[in-house]
Amino acid sequence: MKPSKTAVCLLIVYDKKICLLWAMATIKAVLKPDKKKDGTFPIVVRITKDRKTNYVPIGYSARLDQWDAARGCVRKNYTNSVWLNNLIAHRISELSRNAIELETDKPEVSVTTIKNSSKRNRIAMFFIQAEAYLTDLKNAGKYNQYTADKPRVKHFREYLGRDIAFQEIDVATLERFKAHVKNKLKLSERSAVNHLSMVRSVFSHAKKDKLIKPDVTPFGKGKIVIKFPESGKVGLNAADIKNLETVSLSARPHHCRNIWLFSYYFAGMRISDVLRLKWGDFQNDRLIYVMGKNDKAGSLKISDKVKSILEEYKKDKRSDEDFVFPELKGVDETDQFVMERTIAFKTSAIDKCLKKDVAPAAGIEKKLTMHIARHSFATEAGDKINIQMLQKLYRHSQITTTIGYQSAFINRDADDALDAVLGL
């Protein structure tokens, strides 16, 4: 029996060029000539048949110098080029299978039908989407989350030993993975929960890209609930802070002490916000800034102690656009990823100095890091400040967050109850 014309097809793969030829149609990855504002062009799978063309978007774009038109793939100078080329091949293979089935049953099938068949039959794979999730984090400049979740994706991949469809990831799979993280990788309960949080983030990313339906999830009521274990929060007391303020230190430790105190004086301002402060943020004896973590804006009074610290750095001021502290000077502010990476490195160096040089000199035996400045303010605030004002100072979006955070530092009620039982 002579085969039908539409049933004769050939998937050609040569020199990394991937395309499908069948009858008079072709499927190939190309750059769509719709230049975006950032100078890149959308990567699409082009379906051509009977002189009609349609496009299936890949969801990514590339510059002309990053695209190999002859091979239909990105070059090595594209970030995560291997992953993206695998995604392109996967999309072409998916369309190819659907096209063969449609052409066999209905020879007059159109390019639009072939394109839409991909949407109906696509099986979303977790690690393909996980790489897209990591790429988006990097492109968004989220260095801390990117560097934290990248090894977690790697751990999940190594645990499973293969890619897996989202629909296959159930409660039992995640519970076994959590046990693996704790028992085999020897990581803490909090770290294990962070691994599950990464999986949930990839699910959310897939839903945003409309690759899976909202009800496809192992998370939620009656399933996996993300709950981080409580950790002990210990800050410095008034005596510790007094020692820190008055101890004589050499240049580098003195600078690190200044940054710590600056954070403390502004209600435990996060180090990322401290290092980003510019001279123009200080106006009419007030600090006006937007918190980087949640974009909350606010204004705080500049105390005399803060003014004293600022005076030490004014000699290096050239304009209101200069950073107050030197850690970020010379860094490309337009590259958010580089900014966050630099802040992480500088924070690590400051923490090391605080632990090695500052704490011993000040006679402080407790842990001393930049984050402890926030705990220390909470310790001193105790129940002296009403919870609504603390919410404003901490820039929390929800007051429940403030209540949960501050409760770790209010011990009076528990102490009074204990004294009552013991008759003290």
Image: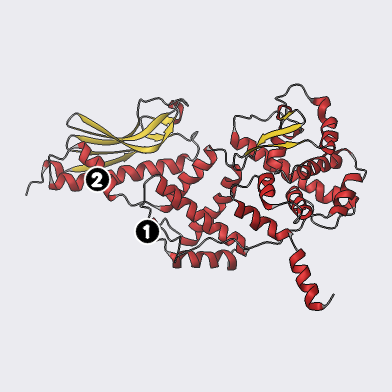
Q: How far is mark 1 from mark 2, CA to CA?
A: 20 Å
- Look at the image and tell me whether residue 262 can be seen: yes
Residue 377, relative to residue 276: is it above or below?
below
Q: Quadrant of residue 116?
A: top left
Residue 372, relative to residue 315: is it above or below?
below
Q: Quadrant of residue 186?
A: bottom right
Tell me the crowding category of disc 2: few under 14, some 14 to 19, or many 20 or more residues within 10 angstroms, Cα based: some
Residue assigned mark 1: 167
Query: What's the colour scheme?
Result: secondary structure
Q: Position of residue 218 (x, y in %)?
A: 43, 61
Residue 345, relative to residue 378: is it above or below?
above
Foreground pick, 372 / 301: 301
Q: Secondary structure at mark 2?
A: helix
Q: Position of residue 88 (x, y in %)?
A: 37, 41
- Look at the image and tell me whether residue 154 can be seen: no
Residue assigned mark 2: 117
